[in-house]
Image (cartoon, rainbow, N blue to C red):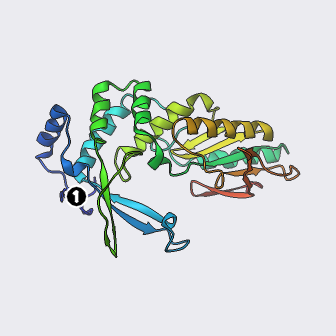
C-alpha cells in the first residue's frame, strides 16, 4: 500500500506497522474486528457533469481503516490462490487488462471486411458494487471452493459496517450499510468478480463473444434476435441474484446499417449507437 494516503477512522497511516501481525492474529482468533474497521467516512465527489444538486451526479469516495485494508490484502492473496475465473473475465485479474476493448474492435473489423453483420450489446449494471447481496458473496466463494475458515474472515469484515457522509456543509449522522461490498476496499474487486463469475459462468460464450471487465459486460452475436435473447437472459439472471441491468444505459451497436431498430429488453428498446466508449477505447460500428 502506498504511503502518504489520508488516514481512515482509526487514524492509522498507510505505512505498515509492526504491531499489525499481533492485531491480525487476534482478529482471526476472536473472529471479531476492531470497531473502527466497521466505520468509514464517505465523501461525495462531483462527476463534473450534471446538476450540483443531483445526488446521482456524485461519485462516493469512502475512507476506510488502513489497517483493515492491509488485512484485506492478505485475505485477497489467499483467495486468489484458490479461485479460478473464466477466461472472459479480465477485471482485477492478474495478467489481464483492458485488452478486451481491442478484441471487440477486431471483431467488428473482421465482420466488416467480410461484409457480414455482427451485433454488440454493452451492458450497464446499476450500482453493481453497491447492490450485491452479502449472502450471494458467501455463496459465490463456496462455489469456488474457498474454505469456510477463509469465508469467515471475509464475513467478519461485514459484521456491522456503517458510514457517515462528509461535505463542506458538515458531517451526517452515522448510518448502517447492509448490502454491497465496501467501496474503496482492497478486497471488494475480487469479491465482485467472483460473484459475477459464479452467477453468469453458464451464460458466457467464448471470447470475444462475451467479454467482462468486472461489471463492464459486452455481448456479441451474428444475429440480432439471438443477441436480444442473450441480453434478456443476462438481465433475468442478474435480477435473481439482487443485481439490476440499467436498460436506459445499456446500448446496442451493429455493423449492419440496413438493420432497422434496436433490441428490446423487458419491453424497452435499447439505445442504438454507432460509437461506444468501452474501457476507455472508442468502438465504432464502422470499426474506426
Residue 143's place in the image compared with 57, above or below, is above
Q: Residues within 10 Å of mark 1 (few under 14, many from 20)?
A: some
Q: Is 180 left or right of 119, judged from the image as shown?
A: left
Residue at 60% x, 46% y: name it. Answer: 245
Residue 185: image location, x then y, percent: 34, 49
Residue 94: image location, x then y, percent: 43, 40
Residue 40: image location, x then y, percent: 29, 56
On-image quarter of the C terminus:
bottom right
Residue that sits furthest to the right in the current view:
258
Residue at 61% x, 33% y: name it. Answer: 204
Residue at 54% x, 49% y: name it. Answer: 98
- In front here: 243 or 14? 243
Q: Is 57 left or right of 28, judged from the image as shown?
A: right
- In front here: 227 or 265? 265
| Helix, strand or loop under label 1 | loop
Is residue 223 visible from the viewing direction of this image?
Answer: no
Residue 3: image location, x then y, percent: 24, 59
- In front here: 37 or 256? 37
Reading the image, the residue beneath label 1 is 9
Residue 224's place in the image compared with 3, above or below, is above
Is residue 177 visible from the viewing direction of this image?
Answer: yes
Q: Is 183 left or right of 149, judged from the image as shown?
A: right
Q: Is 165 left or right of 9, judged from the image as shown?
A: right
- State the image quarter where residue 201 is shown: top right
Amino acid at each position: 500500500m502506498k504511503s502518504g494516503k489520508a488516514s481512515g477512522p482509526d487514524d492509522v497511516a498507510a505505512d505498515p506497522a509492526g504491531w499489525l501481525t499481533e492485531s491480525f492474529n487476534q482478529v482471526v482468533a476472536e473472529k471479531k474486528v476492531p470497531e473502527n474497521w466497521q466505520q468509514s467516512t464517505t465523501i461525495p465527489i462531483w462527476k463534473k457533469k450534471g446538476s450540483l444538486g443531483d445526488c446521482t451526479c456524485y461519485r462516493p469516495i469512502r475512507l476506510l481503516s488502513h489497517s483493515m485494508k492491509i488485512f484485506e490484502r492478505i485475505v485477497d492473496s489467499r483467495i486468489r490462490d484458490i479461485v479460478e475465473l473464466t477466461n472472459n473475465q479480465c477485471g482485477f485479474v492478474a495478467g489481464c487488462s483492458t485488452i478486451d476493448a481491442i478484441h471487440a474492435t477486431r471483431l467488428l473489423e473482421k465482420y466488416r471486411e467480410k461484409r457480414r453483420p455482427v451485433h454488440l450489446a454493452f451492458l450497464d449494471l446499476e450500482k453493481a458494487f453497491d447492490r450485491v447481496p452479502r449472502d450471494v458473496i458467501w455463496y459465490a466463494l463456496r462455489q469456488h471452493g474457498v474454505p469456510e475458515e477463509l469465508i469467515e474472515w471475509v464475513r467478519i469484515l461485514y459484521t456491522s459496517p456503517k458510514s457517515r457522509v462528509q461535505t463542506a456543509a458538515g458531517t451526517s449522522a452515522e448510518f448502517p450499510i447492509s448490502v454491497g461490498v465496501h467501496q474503496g476496499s482492497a478486497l471488494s474487486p475480487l469479491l465482485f468478480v467472483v460473484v459475477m463469475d459464479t452467477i453468469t459462468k453458464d451464460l458466457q460464450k467464448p471470447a470475444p463473444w462475451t467479454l467482462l471487465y468486472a461489471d463492464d459486460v459486452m455481448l456479441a452475436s451474428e444475429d440480432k434476435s439471438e443477441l436480444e435473447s442473450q441480453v434478456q437472459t443476462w438481465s433475468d439472471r442478474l435480477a435473481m441474484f439482487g443485481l439490476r441491468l440499467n436498460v436506459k444505459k445499456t446500448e446496442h451497436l451493429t455493423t449492419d446499417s440496413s438493420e432497422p431498430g434496436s433490441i428490446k429488453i423487458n419491453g424497452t428498446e435499447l439505445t442504438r449507437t454507432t460509437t461506444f466508449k468501452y474501457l476507455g477505447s472508442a468502438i465504432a460500428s464502422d470499426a474506426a
